[in-house]
Amino acid sequence: MQDVVDRIRRFRDERDWMQFHDPQNLAMSVTIEAAELLELFQWKDRDQSKEYAVANRERVAEEIADVAIYLLELADNLGIDLKSAINAKLAINEAKYPVEKARGVATKYTDL
Amino acid sequence: MQDVVDRIRRFRDERDWMQFHDPQNLAMSVTIEAAELLELFQWKDRDQSKEYAVANRERVAEEIADVAIYLLELADNLGIDLKSAINAKLAINEAKYPVEKARGVATKYTDL
Amino acid sequence: MQDVVDRIRRFRDERDWMQFHDPQNLAMSVTIEAAELLELFQWKDRDQSKEYAVANRERVAEEIADVAIYLLELADNLGIDLKSAINAKLAINEAKYPVEKARGVATKYTDL
Amino acid sequence: MQDVVDRIRRFRDERDWMQFHDPQNLAMSVTIEAAELLELFQWKDRDQSKEYAVANRERVAEEIADVAIYLLELADNLGIDLKSAINAKLAINEAKYPVEKARGVATKYTDL
């Protein structure tokens, strides 16, 4: 991913936008883009959301990319290694949701 | 990132959670986690958000990871190559915001 | 609702918080609270979300109130009459989604 | 607000949309609309967000109304009296943030 991060940095710096890219503004942008991704699946049921995603993969990929771009930049700006951060969080989740208790339980995160 | 994606898949499949991980539920989770990331910077001004991020890098990294985990899984489930998707979107953004017009303009995305 | 708005104003002014309640900070807070409301229904299917809401009405009411409090204050600060604004938007929606075309169509807002 | 709620009900029922308006779908829509409201203030600083709101009051009012419409319908569907819910939450907030401790403190909700 490092070449992608380099391209994000270059895009930002050529436009002199670092001055606007504080953590709050970037987190705001991550959230706004996440809601646009969610909007693609608004009012659909589970099966319709799958059918939509298959039939409109380019559109979905674009919204996913919008979230990812701001998220990668935020991590990069703070000196956070995203891969290490994900591995650390997965270790927490693996301990928090033991296989024998979590298996097949839908309401996992909220009510377990 | 492929080993991270493999670990996300394994985490999900050991718990038999694929049945809940349709695109709508994953996009919902991306949005909920994004808002939790944003909450870290709520009520702070620009400088305070930077100071907070530096002083609480582990906390911020954890929230970034939460967003990234769902986003990576969503892309993986749909057969979307995240790196290609990001590069495609960056190419669009580079064309949409020409350096000479966008340089130093804060209200770039919304009003340009 | 005016007495509720008066209480929101008083709560804010007794704490000298108007200085933080610019439109951006309030819109951020509306979004963060909306995502907390959504989190109550995360991972649930349609029927489960209804059952949860009936069984946890106090909890749901509290999250709805959190969104409403910031939304009412934002409207009040900007001199927006919420009831007029809602009526104006409903008139737009009524014209945009004619009964004969929209009846029973799930993907109404996104694909019509 | 009851006549507004009646109009929201009528709008929904004439289109036979109650079948889609479970709590999860409505909470999702509240969140999506909240993020659209936030988008109006994206990349702006505090003063710019005020100037924008004054100069574009109709636009802001429309996005506020979008959030309010789904929020009012969700409360109505669950038999929640919004005014009582807001008053109950304000009483909690008044106790949680005593005037003498909260006065002028920006990071109130997150760090107090």
Image (spheres, coloured by chain):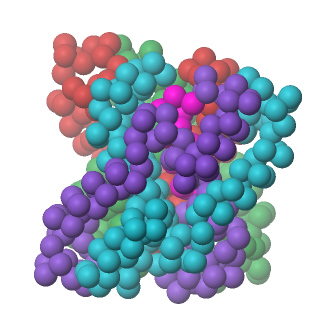
Chain colours: A cyan, B purple, C red, D green
**Residue B27 part of the magenta-drawn span:** yes
Q: Residue at x 24, y 72 (%)?
A: B108
Q: Quadrant of residue D32?
A: top left
What percent of the width, then of the height, locates residue C58? 72, 37
What percent of the width, then of the height, locates residue C42? 61, 35
Residue A35 in the figure: left or right of residue B4: left
Q: Nearer the viewer, residue C81 or C20?
A: C20
What percent of the width, then of the height, locates residue A95? 83, 46
- Secondary structure that dominates the magenta span: helix
Placement of B3 over or under D94, stated as above or below: above
Q: Is residue B53 among the parts visible in the rendering?
A: yes
Placement of D103 over or under C109, stated as above or below: below
Q: Nearer the viewer, residue D50 or C45?
A: C45
Q: Residue at x 39, y 73 (%)?
A: A6
What percent of the width, then of the height, locates residue C10? 59, 69
Give the quarter of the figure containing the C terminus of chain B: bottom left
**Residue C91 part of the magenta-drawn span:** no
Q: Nearer the viewer, residue A60 or C15?
A: A60
Q: Residue at x 51, y 47 (%)?
A: B71
Placement of C103 over or under D110, stated as above or below: above
Q: Is residue C82 among the parts visible in the rendering?
A: no
Placement of A31 over or under A110, stated as above or below: below
Q: Which residues are magenta?
A: B21-37
Residue D45 in the figure: left or right of residue B100: right
Q: Residue furthest front?
A: B3
Q: Nearer the viewer, residue B2 or A67?
A: B2
Q: Residue at x 37, y 30 (%)?
A: A53
Give the quarter of the figure containing the N terminus of chain B: bottom right
Residue A80 in the figure: left or right of residue A102: left
**Total numbered labels placed on residues in the image:** 0
